[in-house]
């Protein structure tokens, strides 16, 4: 009989091939085997799994990790720590981080929700290769070297939005608890053999070149900014990068009118984007990329800046402070215009 799930468990790894089933029977893994919502045995993933606390690391998997994956072949050699699930302390998203040098040996993709016919394989058509964000409350297929898993979330609420909020709270609680354990983890308790792979993290190891697409959005995490009102030329959204979990902004531009007007507006926007690519000034927002230019809702990607000029002006009370703010903002605008 399977034991009850640990309350700090975020999701299970349900095994879908014979190699993965061998991991379920490993002596070191058995204490983390519990029952999923639909009665299947699965490996628990949560902050309670590691013996040694390690900041944002939730659970590691590998030859000598928190959960043991021993199967190895000449083509797919299992490393000491092959992958790790990590918590992003700013965005509170969960990331799958590949610690192995064989980055292409790890893939994952969303499973189609109930009632969605999906693709013939019943998964989203383009799986993520290597590092990436795990979407809350959405099951995934995960391939790690020779192992095939299904990532299955627990059900904490019958409402999807509430379920996501509860999981984010649970992950944040686990992260804060981990930090407290680390503070109590004295230097005399630390292992003498330092594992350099543990120091590698998503924002250090994954460098992008100028030829790479800087950001790839997690579509399910897009969040509209500024309420229901759109700006003069479109709507701004807060978005999450699929690889790193970092936040950025997407401006969706509205192209309206007859076909000739739309093509003229698209050409003007294209010229503006080409100009943005060449700009480098502290008072002009950086350009991070674009997308969907073949549609009537092209997108421009920039860094996310919290707040607005309107909210900034409301935060100052005295006339003197407002005068100082106005002078500062005006100077920044004029220097940017002078640069242009």
Image: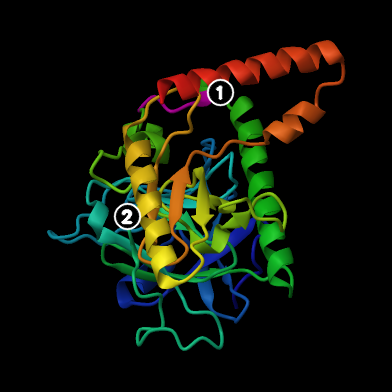
- Residue found at x 34% / y 70%: 126
Q: Quadrant of residue 333?
A: top right
The residue that disc 2 covers is: 130
Q: Nearer the viewer, residue 123 or 38?
A: 123
Please tell me whether mark 2 or mark 1 is closer to you in this view.
1
Q: Nearer the viewer, residue 156 or 90?
A: 90
Q: Which secondary structure lies at badge 1? A: helix
In this view, 136 is above or below 274: below
Tell me if I can see residue 83 in this picture.
no
Q: Position of residue 103 (x, y in %)?
A: 26, 52
Q: Which segment did they paint magenta?
A: 189-193
Q: Quadrant of residue 154?
A: bottom right
Q: Tell whether 157 sits left or right of 210.
A: right
Mark 2 or 1 closer to N-term? 2
The residue that disc 1 covers is: 333
The residues bearing labels 2 and 1 have C-alpha atoms spaced at a distance of 42 Å
Q: Position of residue 195 (x, y in %)?
A: 35, 33
Q: Which secondary structure lies at badge 2? A: loop
């Amino acid at each position: 009989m399977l034991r009850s799930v640990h309350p700090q468990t975020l999701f299970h790894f349900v095994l879908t091939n014979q190699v993965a089933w061998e991991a379920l029977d490993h002596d070191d893994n058995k204490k983390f085997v519990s029952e999923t919502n639909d009665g299947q045995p699965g490996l628990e993933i949560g902050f309670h799994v590691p013996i040694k606390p390690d900041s944002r690391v939730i659970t590691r998997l590998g030859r000598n990790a928190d959960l043991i994956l021993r199967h190895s072949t000449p083509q797919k050699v299992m490393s000491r720590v092959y992958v790790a699930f990590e918590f992003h302390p700013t965005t509170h998203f969960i990331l799958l981080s590949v610690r192995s040098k064989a980055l292409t040996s790890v893939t994952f993709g969303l499973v189609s929700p109930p009632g969605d016919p999906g693709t013939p394989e019943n998964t989203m058509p383009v799986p993520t290769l290597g590092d990436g964000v795990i979407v809350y409350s959405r099951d995934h297929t995960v391939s790690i070297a020779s192992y095939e898993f299904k990532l299955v979330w627990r059900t904490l609420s019958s409402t999807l939005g509430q379920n996501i909020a509860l999981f984010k709270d649970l992950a944040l609680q686990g992260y804060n608890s981990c930090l407290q354990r680390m503070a109590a983890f004295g230097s005399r308790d630390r292992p003498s053999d330092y594992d350099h792979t543990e120091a590698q993290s998503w924002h250090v190891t994954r460098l992008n070149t100028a030829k790479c697409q800087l950001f790839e959005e997690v579509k399910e995490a897009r969040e509209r900014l500024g309420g229901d009102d759109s700006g003069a030329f479109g709507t701004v959204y807060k978005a999450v990068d699929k690889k790193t979990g970092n936040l950025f902004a997407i401006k969706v531009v509205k192209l309206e009118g007859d076909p000739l007007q739309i093509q003229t507006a698209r050409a003007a926007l294209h010229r503006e984007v080409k100009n943005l690519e060449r700009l480098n000034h502290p008072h002009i927002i950086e350009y991070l990329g674009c997308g969907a230019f073949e549609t009537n809702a092209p997108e421009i990607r920039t860094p996310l800046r919290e707040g607005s000029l309107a909210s900034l002006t409301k935060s100052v009370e005295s006339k003197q402070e407002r005068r100082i703010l106005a002078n500062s903002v005006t100077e920044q605008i004029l220097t940017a215009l002078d640069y242009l």
